[in-house]
Image: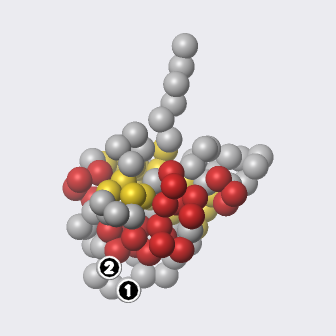
Amino acid sequence: MVELLSGLGGSLADSQRGRALLEEKVREGDTWRELFQSLGTRIQPFAERVWDLPTQQIDSQILVILNGRLVRQDTILESAIEGGDRIVFVPPYQGG
């Protein structure tokens, strides 16, 4: 499952909760890069806010949480997706 938190889901987001949930079917052995590339190709808000199609990289301002743990963007892309994985993209927050 892919979850986009407030500000990232755009037109996909639940306006009251500020998030979008995407469930995608993947094949055994698929990597996160392959999934993100597929999502970025099909879903404009994902490409605009999370995944850079030309460079095939996650926006550097986005935090990535995989199965409840913060992960480095550069380590996740070539990892194989496993059954039950849940990834959350968190936008940058500003405080004052």
Q: Residue furthest right?
A: 16
Residue name at image x 49 percent, y 44 percent: 90
Q: Is residue 72 left or right of residue 63?
A: left
The residue pinned by badge 1 equals 27
Is residue 33 something that shows in the picture? yes
Q: Secondary structure at mark 2?
A: loop
User: Which residue extends farthest bottom?
Assistant: 27
Residue 14 occupies quadrant? bottom right
Q: Residues within 10 Å of mark 2 (few under 14, many from 20)?
A: some
**Residue 6 position by quadrant:** top right
> Label 1 amino acid?
Arg
Label 1: which secondary element: loop
Looking at the image, residue 32 sits to the left or right of residue 21; the answer is left
Q: Is residue 82 visible in the rendered structure shown here?
A: no
Residue contact between numbered discs 1 and 2, judged by CB atoms under 8 Å? yes
**How many dots with numbers?**
2
